[in-house]
Image (spheres, rainbow, N blue to C red):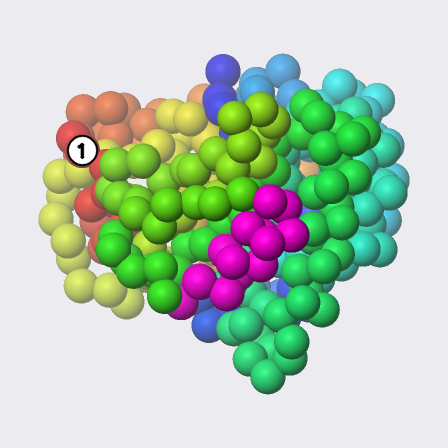
């Protein structure tokens, strides 16, 4: 049983953030029929289905139907979004019992629109949160700030102050992202700030980091790109470790393949068997 399966319903985004590299693969939007096929196969395998790997999921032209299919299949969904479309999509999201968690990447707005007033971006997110408090108290909401080091809050101060003012709370600025990344906003409810430092997306062009290490790929999660390619890790944005295509064979057969099992067993025993993994700096975050 996996904790998460990432399904990339689209690799197209409505912004281009400096912390999110350009997708070199052809632009692709997953059709409803293909999404339904994948969903039927992965729901029995995982706790949550995350509608994100690259791209902005709320920009999918048939996102309403995506949620309807998810409800039919009893899927538990997570959405990671930059939040720019939240006003338009609020009714769909809050009205869907399939949605379990939504993550807002708050640093996206200033990264793309540094001269625009921050209120124009945060007001619709605030309204979504307040409505969720009333109609969806079961919904987990993460306000993500994955853009700073262990001791620095300066880059995010205006964002934090906005929510303190408009939601009525005070938050201590100290956080150690190497230990505890989340801060619960209120004693009751499921609203959190989630902090982390920036990271380098793995690349085959990076220098080797060694053959020892571990990862959560194929252990608590895996990813499926919009074209059906299965990858062991949600950071394999270009599908370099191509395990197979789930439009050509079943997800289960791909996961049980010799290559997939070798990767998983390697991680379990502190060995990195794939070249991309041996060049990945993110792996340093996991202890063998």
Q: Residue 34: in sight, yes or no?
A: no
Q: Quadrant of the C terminus?
A: top left
Point out residue 10 in the picture as x, y percentages from the top left corner: 68, 54
Q: Measuring 13% from the left and 39% from the top, which residue is drawn there?
A: 212
Q: Residue 213: in sight, yes or no?
A: yes
Any magenta on residue 257?
A: no
Secondary structure under tag 1 reads loop
Point out residue 160 in the picture as x, y percentages from the top left corner: 50, 56
Among the 4 quarters of the image, the one containing residue 273: top left
Q: Measuring 55% from the left and 65% from the top, which residue is drawn there?
A: 108
Point out residue 162 in the picture as x, y percentages from the top left corner: 58, 59
Provide the major secondary structure of the magenta segment.
helix
- Foreground: 182 or 260? 182
- Please tell me whether residue 159 is drawn above or below residue 75 in the rendered image: below
Residue at the farthest bottom position: 115
In the rendered view, does 1 fall on the left or right side of 123? Answer: left
In the rendered view, does 253 fall on the left or right side of 125? Answer: left
Q: Measuring 18% from the left and 63% from the top, which residue is drawn there?
A: 207
Q: Which residue is mark 1?
A: 287
Any magenta on residue 158?
A: yes
Extent of the magenta region: 155-168
Binning the other alpha carbons within 10 Å of mark 1 as few (below 14), some (14 to 19) or many (20 upward) gives few
In the rendered view, does 202 fall on the left or right side of 45? Answer: left
Disc tally is 1
Q: Measuring 58% from the left and 36% from the top, which residue is drawn there?
A: 191
- Foreground: 240 or 151? 151
Among the 4 quarters of the image, the one containing residue 103: top right
- Foreground: 4 or 32? 4
Point out residue 208 in the picture as x, y percentages from the top left corner: 16, 57
Among the 4 quarters of the image, the one containing residue 94: top right
């Amino acid at each position: 049983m996996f904790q998460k399966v990432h399904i990339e319903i689209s690799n197209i985004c409505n912004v281009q953030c400096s912390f999110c590299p350009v997708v070199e693969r052809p632009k692709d939007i997953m059709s409803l029929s293909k999404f339904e096929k994948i969903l039927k196969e992965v729901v029995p395998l995982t706790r949550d289905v995350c509608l994100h790997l690259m791209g902005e999921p709320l920009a999918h032209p048939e996102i309403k139907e995506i949620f309807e299919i998810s409800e039919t299949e009893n899927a538990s969904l997570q959405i990671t979004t930059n939040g720019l479309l939240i006003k338009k999509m609020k009714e769909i999201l809050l009205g869907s019992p399939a949605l379990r968690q939504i993550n807002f990447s708050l640093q996206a707005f200033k990264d793309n629109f540094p001269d625009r007033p921050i209120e124009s971006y945060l007001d619709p997110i605030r309204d979504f949160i307040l409505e969720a408090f009333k109609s969806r108290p079961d919904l987990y909401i993460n306000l993500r700030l994955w853009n700073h080091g262990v001791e620095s809050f300066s880059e995010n101060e205006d964002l934090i102050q906005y929510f303190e003012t408009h939601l009525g709370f005070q938050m201590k600025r100290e956080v150690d992202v190497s230990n505890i990344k989340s801060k619960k906003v209120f004693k009751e409810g499921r609203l959190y700030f989630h902090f982390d430092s920036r990271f380098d997306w793995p690349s085959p062009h990076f220098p080797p980091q060694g053959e020892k290490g571990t990862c959560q790929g194929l252990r608590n999660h895996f990813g499926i790109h919009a074209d059906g390619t299965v990858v062991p890790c949600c950071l394999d944005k270009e599908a370099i470790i191509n395990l197979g295509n789930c439009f050509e064979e079943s997800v289960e057969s791909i996961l049980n393949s010799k290559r997939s099992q070798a990767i998983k067993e390697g991680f379990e025993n502190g060995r990195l068997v794939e070249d991309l993994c041996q060049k990945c700096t993110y792996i340093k975050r996991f202890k063998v």
